[in-house]
Amino acid sequence: MRRREITLRVNGTTFTASAEPRKTLADFIREDCGLTGTHLGCEHGVCGACTILMNGQTVRSCLMFAVQAEGAELMTVEGLADGDRLHAIQQAYWDHHALQCGFCTPGFLMTTVEFLQDHPQPTEREIREGLAGNLCRCTGYQNIVKAVAAASQMVAADPHWVPRWASPEPPTAARASAGNGGTPTSRKRTTRSKPVKPSRSPRRRRPKR
Amino acid sequence: MKPAAFEYHTPRTVDEAVALLARYGEEGKVLAGGQSLVPLMNMRLARPANIIDINRIDALAYLRRERGVLRLGALTRQRAAERSPIIAQHCPILRDALRLVGHAQIRNRGTVGGSIAHADPAGELTAILLALDGEVTVRGPKRTRVIAAADLFVTYLTTSLDPHELLIEVRFPLPPEGAGWSWMEIARRHGDFALAGVGVVLAVRRGRIAEARIGLTGVGPTPVRAAQAERGLVGQPPSTALWAEAAEAVRGAVEPDGDIHASAEYRKHVAGVLTLRALQEAYERARKVA
Amino acid sequence: MKIDGTNTLPASVDTVWKTINDPEALRRCTPGLKELKAISPDNYAATLQIGIAAVKGTYAGTLRITDKQAPTHYRIILEGTGGAGFMKGEGTVDLEPQGDGTLLKWVGDIQIGGLIAGVGQRMLGGIGKMLIGQFFKCLEESLGSGS
């Protein structure tokens, strides 16, 4: 089984690496892109911990092979916060104690990004059904539902709330054809689009004691 | 859990894909949405030596209405079909059923053709294809042929396609203008496989049922067409008693198996209950043509 | 999982009895049976390759026939282990004359475990019955052709 060179973009950064066709997209994101925010729960498409956005749509990255994402525009949980500034959706999860161990949370956040675009003013039932593809063993879901409801109100006030990596339009430059993935020199990682700021932003809150 | 190694092929055209299937036969497996195949591969319950990834065959992704028939290329994503204005207007039962296919993440990748070829005994699309007398076009190395829904589903996860054949198009004849519809299924959680599901289409003319279609899923190895129940409805004036009779006929027509999720008796019973409710809802939605 | 059924076979009780004890007939009619090697009388090593659609597994095990009461009754025990799981099936077969043919009554208890049982739970019962149905259909055909 020959390795293939794969080029894709995650949260605006281009990654090129070679992998066997059987390597799942989830593993590629974690190992070759070094982005371990995307988690592996069941690895058979049930728990949603591996949920990411591909070309603006949620997918279970454990059910895709990395080669299939050639040229795609991906978004993972690492693309939500702006440095230390939490995205409104993350803030809502934080405010409403919608995570305990946090293992399922990245998947829930990605699902929420798509869900709120499709349902800007969701009812509780719509939220429960919309999140049904993500499993949580800690919280019992109550606070996640509250967080999403709160997030829907927070983002309603901001027309630019959708992160740009969640765009449904893959940039044409990134649409390399299969097997012709990237530049002759295999780069592990290009420069980040934004330096990570260590300074504290006013929106970051301390956990309540 | 990681899949076993395989040779990976990315045909760009249907001909290329079919040539690969001809070459590898039973040692090759088509990869479309992957939402059913990849879990099996991750668990190593399926270890195909060759994966024929058809996702780059753009020619297979289309959705159009032509002379009273809905034509979907095999690679039409379930999510695209769910949101299609054509389907919403002309075949809303499909839209309602699609909303219950798994979850959004699954529908974003899963395809209509893949779902039909996979033939899950609790699938929604297979039951609707059967109820509407749909058909599929399959292409093999030597010929292209059409398979009617009634001849397509053989048993669990098995269709009458040869190992060398690729399903390329799915066709749903559209219900008559003004027909009422209803898709109802029951599952323990939203998005779970249906314990039982019923799709009903009813056309009403001059105060009587002019046409009735009833398709069921989750009640046997393949989807079930409740033909006897349908015959009992046609020509009759609608009434609660009529729906109850049809529900009884449906119960008699299904022999579901039990498992840890639901007993056979429960599935049989609930198939009848859903039929009754679906007939009610379909009738309410039907345009009453004088 | 308990299952049972009856089949009418177009042959006399004696002929049916001979057939269901014949390793050739068992080899031919048991779905997925790739190899049947006699270890001792009524005791065989079996290799099964069985599956549905893309899911295929190889199981190695034994097939034993016990409690023989010729020509009307025996117990058959089939066990196998493989990568995807394990299975153990035990059944009794009873024959009685019915007109010109034989009425075959079978009662079985099948246990399937391992990965395949967890994943395929909702189809196992149906698939099990289907495979047993294939077995008896094959028997019917070989008896009907007078072989």
Image (cartoon, coloured by chain):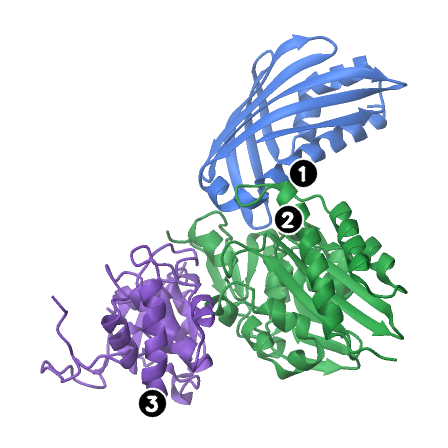
Chain colours: A purple, B green, C blue
The spot of residue C136 in percent (x, y) is 73, 30
Which disc is residue A157 wearing? 3
Amino acid of disc 3: Ala
The reply to whether dot 1 and dot 2 touch (C-beta < 8 Å) is: yes
Q: Which residue, given by chain and number where applicable, does mark 1 sit on? A: C130
Tell me the element at label 1.
helix
Tell me the element at label 2.
loop
Tell me the element at label 3.
loop
Whole-angstrom CA distance, mark 3 to mark 1, is 59 Å
Q: Residue at x 61, y 19 (%)?
A: C76
Instruction: Answer yes or no: are tags 1 and 2 on the same subunit.
Output: no
For label 3, the crowd category at 10 Å Cα-Cα, with few meaning under 14, some 14 to 19 and many 20 or more, is: few
Whole-angstrom CA distance, mark 2 to mark 3, is 50 Å
* Chain letter of the residue carrying label 1: C
The reply to whether dot 3 and dot 1 touch (C-beta < 8 Å) is: no
For label 1, the crowd category at 10 Å Cα-Cα, with few meaning under 14, some 14 to 19 and many 20 or more, is: some
> Is A48 situated left or right of B66 in this image?
left
Instruction: Answer yes or no: are tags 2 and 3 on the same subunit.
Output: no
The spot of residue B224 in percent (x, y) is 73, 54
Q: Is residue A32 above or below residue C83?
A: below
Amino acid of disc 1: Met
| Residue toward you, B285 or C13 | B285
Q: Quadrant of residue B90?
A: bottom right
Q: Quadrant of the N terminus of chain C?
A: top right
Q: Which residue, given by chain and number where applicable, does mark 2 sit on? A: B156
Which disc is residue C38 wearing? none
Of badges 3 and 1, nearer the viewer stands 3
Q: Is residue A134 above or below residue B83?
A: above
* Chain letter of the residue carrying label 3: A
Q: Residue at x 31, y 83 (%)?
A: A154
For label 2, the crowd category at 10 Å Cα-Cα, with few meaning under 14, some 14 to 19 and many 20 or more, is: many
Q: Residue at x 33, y 86 (%)?
A: A161
